[in-house]
Amino acid sequence: MTIYQNNDKETLIPFGSCLTGKEIEIFQKNSNIVTYNKRENIFRQNTRTSHIMFVKSGYVKIYKEGRNNKFIILKIAIPGEYLGLMSIFGSDMHQYSASAIDSVEVCFIDLQTFLGFVKENGDFAMKIINILSIYGIYIFDRLMSQSHKQLPGRIADVILYFAETIYKSQTFEFPFTRRELAELAGTTKESFIRTLAEFKNDKIIQLNGSEVTINSIKIIKTLSNLG
């Protein structure tokens, strides 16, 4: 982990277009950039919130820790996405954990500074409310998927998530181990591997190690919709 002062005037603040020049100057004076190595923890569940963060580069795994070393991967945070929003407005403790998937740069902003922007700038506050609503809807959809969809539908959801939301490409590399992918789909590692192999054998996808190419996005979407 490497920490350095944020003197980069070109840092793209999520929803920064809503901030005034003075607010951006305050942001620059009250933020730092932290670089994390692959799989390094950014923050842990049940630790106190002291900053709001956003991903400057790289990808971040957001996950919930349970008992007996059980985990649920909630989502992947991409560049330009805030970390910790759901915690700072609902609790003074982080409600989930975050770790670097690859080499990641995270911008840490003083919490009181950020809350000051929210209190004083209505346009900025509305953007934050909007993104919190999107996060909530996504979690509801995940719960419905894992509760009501059969395994092929859940695996199709995972493939679509990486193809359309994370990488925006029908060819991509899974950034997780098979165990982590199973956690994302809400199934066992063995079931995930078996279903993925069935997709490959049916020529719905091509699979070469961690690299996936979707041969038929239509079939993947049909599997997702039918559940």
Image (tube, rainbow, N blue to C red):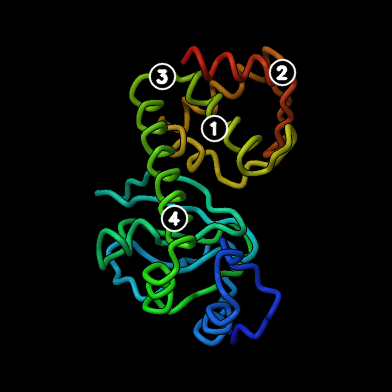
Q: Are marks 4 and 2 in contact (CB under 8 Å)?
A: no
Q: Amino acid at mark 2?
A: Ser
Please name which of the two marks, 4 or 1, marks the residue nearer to the observer. 4
> Mark 4 or mark 3, which has the lower sequence index?
4
Give the spatial CA distance, label 4 vs label 1. 30 Å
Q: Give the mark nearer the N terminus: 2 vs 1.
A: 1
Q: Earlier in the sequence, mark 4 or mark 2?
A: 4
Rounded to the nearest angstrom, the CA distance separating label 2 from label 1 is 15 Å
Residue at 60%, 30% in the rendered image: 160
Residue 171 versus residue 76 in the image, above or below: above
Q: Mark 4 is on which residue type?
A: Met
Instruction: Tell me which amino acid carries mark 3.
Output: Lys
What residue is pinned by disc 3?
149
Q: Quadrant of residue 195?
A: top right
Look at mark 1 in the image and give the residue it sits on: 158
Q: Going from the N terminus, do you reach mark 2 or mark 3 first?
A: 3
Check disc 1: other Cα within 10 Å, few if <14, some if 14-19, many if 20+. Answer: some
* Secondary structure of residue under mark 3: loop
Q: Which residue is mark 2?
A: 216
Q: Say left or right for 91 vs 190.
A: left
Q: Which residue is mark 4?
A: 126
Query: Which of the pair 40/170 is nearer the observer?
Result: 170
6 up-or-down from 48: above or below: below
Picture residue at 37% right of the left edge, 78% below the top: 112
